[in-house]
Image (cartoon, rainbow, N blue to C red):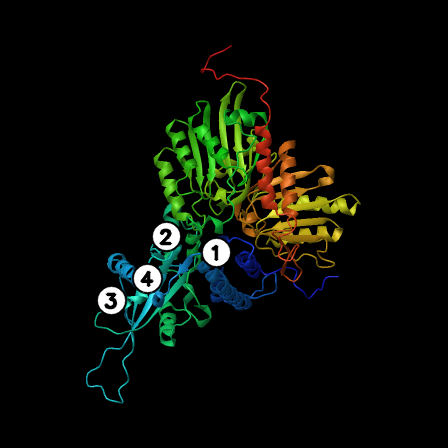
Amino acid sequence: MADPNEPRFFNRELSWLEFNQRVLDQAHDSSLPLLERLKFLAISGSNLDEFASVRLGTLQGLLEEGRRQADAAGLTPEQQSRVVLGRMRQFVADQYLCFLDELTPALTKAGIKRVLPHELTLVQSQISNAVFKDELFPILSPMAVNPEGERPLLMNLAPHLAVRLAPTATKNATPSTEPPPHRFALIPFGRQRQRFITLPGDGGFNYILLEDLVMLHVGQFFPGETVVEAVPFRITRNADVELREDSAVDLLAGMQEILDARKVSACVRLEMAQQVSAETRAFLEELLVVDADDVFLIPGPLELSAFMRLTSMQGFEQLKDEPWPPVASPQIDPAKSLFETIAERDVLLYHPYESFEPVVRLIEEAAVDPDVLAIKQTLYRTSSRSPIVAALKRAAMNGKYVTALVELKARFDEARNIEWAKDLERNGVQVIYGVKGLKTHAKICLIARREPQGIVRYMHFGTGNYNEQTSLIYSDASLMTCDEELGADATSFFHAITGYSQPQRFRKLEAAPISLRDHLLEMIDVETRHKKQGRKALILIKLNALVDERMIEALYQASQAGVKVRLSIRGVCCLRPGVPGLSENITVSSVIDRFLEHSRILYFHHGGDDRLFISSADWMPRNLDRRVELLVPVEEPAAKNRLMSILKLHLQDTAKGRRLLPDGRYERMSGDNGHEGVRSQAELYRLAQAALQAAEQQPVSMFEPHRAPGQEL
C-alpha cells in the first residue's frame, strides 16, 4: 500500500529541472555528433534562463507576500525556494563540467577553438586589436556608477562588464585617514552584439569571445585611470508580470505596459564570473538589490545559449546529425487543389517528418480562391516573416471576410504579436486581441467556401503553432477536414471567442475552460468503471506536461481499479508512477531527441469504441481553467489508424525514452547508453520516407490532361 506520509505528487519546479537535466544529458552523450551535443547544452542554457525568469520570480513573489501554504508535494514557498536554488546550482555545475571538461577539448580537437587572450598569436593579436579599435571602442559606452545616484537600467539577460577602478588619491591624507572607496563602471554589451570574434588560425574556426576581447583592452575606456578588475556578469529579471485585465481599458496599451514593466522588474538571478572579488560582488549585490542566495558564480563563459550559433556553422557537417528534411505527404497531390483533397477524405500530417507546407498552402489557396468567402484563424506564436500572416492580409485585400484572433498575452512573443495585430488591421483584417481573462492557445483555422451543394467549411486543427520555422523542429500533428459537424462546432467556437455569444455545447469538439476538463475526467471514469466491471480498459496519453491535481487523482483511481495507463510526458510530470496501492498500473516515459516532442495525443479504449484525439492543451491548471484550448476527435479510419500507430511508437521508445521512477528519478529504458531498441523519431522519419516512396512507385492508371478553366469535354 502507498505510504500515507509520502506526498502523492512531485514538486512542479523540481520536475521541470529534471526535464532540463534530461536535455543536458544529451550534451553528455558521447555517441551523438559533437555539434549536436553543443546544441543540447545551448538549449539547456536557454531553458534555464526562461525558468529563472518565470518560476524564480513566482517563488519570490510568494515569499514577499508571506505565503506559507505548502504545495501538493508538501513544500512551502520557502522550502521550494531553497531546494530549487540548490538544484539549480547543481545543474549549473553539471553544465560547465560538460562544457569545460568534455565539449571544449573535443571542439578544439575538431578545429573549433576558443582562443584565450594569453594564447593570441602575433597575427591574431593584430586582428583582434583592429576589431576592438574599429568595431567595439566606438560603439560600447561605459557607465560610471555613483553609489548615491540613480541606479542604471541594465538589460535583462544581456552580458555586461563590471569594471573596478582604483581609488582617486586624496590630498592631505594621513595614515589614520580611511582609504577612499573603489569606483565602479559598467559596460553593457547589448543583446545583438556579436559574441564570437573570428580569428585566423591553422584551419578550422578560431574565435575569441567578446568579453575576453573587451577585458583585454578595457583600460582604453578609462585613460589616466588604473583598472583593478573587470568581471563579466548578467542579470535575470522577473518576467512573471501579468496584466490586470479588469483594469486595462485598452489591451494593446496594457500589454505594452507589461513589456515596459519587465525591463525594470526585480533581478531574480545574478550571474558573474567565478573569479570576481569580494568588493565587486558586494557592489553588484547592492546595486541590483539581490541576496547572496540569488548569486550564481560561473566557472566559464556566461550565457551558454549563445553557443547555439556555433552549431550552424558551415564546413563542419561531419560534426552534425544527418539531415532529416521534411518529406512531402503522399496524401497531398501537388497538382490538385487542397480543397479537392480534403473533400475526398481527412488528411492527417505529422510534422516535422512530413512537411508543414500543406498547412501554409491551404491558407494561401484560400486567400486567392474566388469561391472562398471567409477565413477565421487563431494566431498564438508566428515566425518573424510569416507566410500565413501574409496570406491573411492578401485574403482581406481580395475582399474576403478575414478574422484573426492574435493572442497578445503569449509570453515572450507579445511584442511580435502586437506588431502583427497592427499590420493585419491596417490591411483590412478584423483582429481580435484574445479573450478577456484567458489566453487563446487553441490552434484552428476555418475556411468557408461556396460550392455547388452550398457552403462547405474546411478546417485545420493542430497541436502546434502556425509557425513554419518551429514546425521544422517541433513534433506536432495537423488534421485537415471538412467534417460537417466539426465545421458547425468551429463556427460556434469562433462566434464565442470573437463576440459576446455564450459558448454553446459542441457536437464533437471540447473546449477549455468550458467542458474540456469535465470531458477528460468522464473519459477516465468510463475506463475505471469498465475495468471494475471486468471489461478491458486502457488509457494512452502523450502530453508535454502533467501537473493538474484533479486529473492526476483521476488517473490514480483508474490505476487502483486496474486500468493500464501509459503516459509519455516530455517535461513536467507531477504524477508519481509505480507506487503500490496508488499508481502501480501507471508508467511514465519521456522522450528527448533531436526534435522537440510537442504533440498532444490521447486514446481511451472506451469499451471497444476507441476514442482518439489531438489537443492543444497540456494537463495543467492554466490550460484547463485559464486558457482557450481544444480537444479534437480523429475519426476517419485511415487517419485514426495512423495516429494510433504514432502514439504507440512514442510509448515504445526504448532508445531515447527515459522511465520515471517512483522517487522522481529517470532511468534509461534499455542498453548501456540507451541506444538499443526502438527510437521513435528515427522510425517515424523512416516511415514517412517509405510512405512517400511507395506512393511515387504506384503505376499511373490513367492520363488526365490539364484543361483551360471552363473547358468541358
Q: Report how far apart the C-alphas of labels 1 and 4 lie in the structure.
A: 32 Å
**Image vertical order of residue 70 relative to residue 599, above or below:** below
Residue farthest toward the front in the current orientation of the protein: 202
Q: Is residue 212 left or right of residue 696?
A: left
Q: Name the spot of residue 583 as percent of width and height, x first.
A: 70, 56
Q: Amino acid at mark 3?
A: Gln
Q: Indicate whether 358 appears above or below 584.
A: above
On the image, numbered disc 4 is attached to which residue? 153
- Mark 2 or mark 3: name the one nearer the start of the chain: 3
Helix, strand or loop at disc 3?
helix
Label of residue 38 in the image: 1
The mark nearer the N terminus, 3 or 1, is 1
Residue 120 found in image quarter: bottom left
Give the class, few, some or many, for how many residues have Cα within 10 Å of label 4's Cα (few <14, many ≥20). few
Which mark is nearer the camera, 3 or 4?
A: 3
- The residue that mark 2 highlights is 257
Are the residues at dot 1 and dot 4 in contact (C-beta closer than 8 Å)?
Answer: no
The span from disc 3 to disc 4 (Cα, nearest Å) is 24 Å
Q: Of the residues under marks 2 and 4, which one precedes in the sequence?
A: 4
Q: CA distance from mark 2 to mark 4?
A: 17 Å
Q: Is residue 72 visible?
A: yes
For the N terminus, the quadrant is bottom right
Q: Which residue is mark 3?
A: 220
Asked whether the beta carbons under mark 2 and mark 1 sit within 8 Å of each other, the answer is no
Q: What secondary structure is found at the residue carrying circle 2?
A: helix
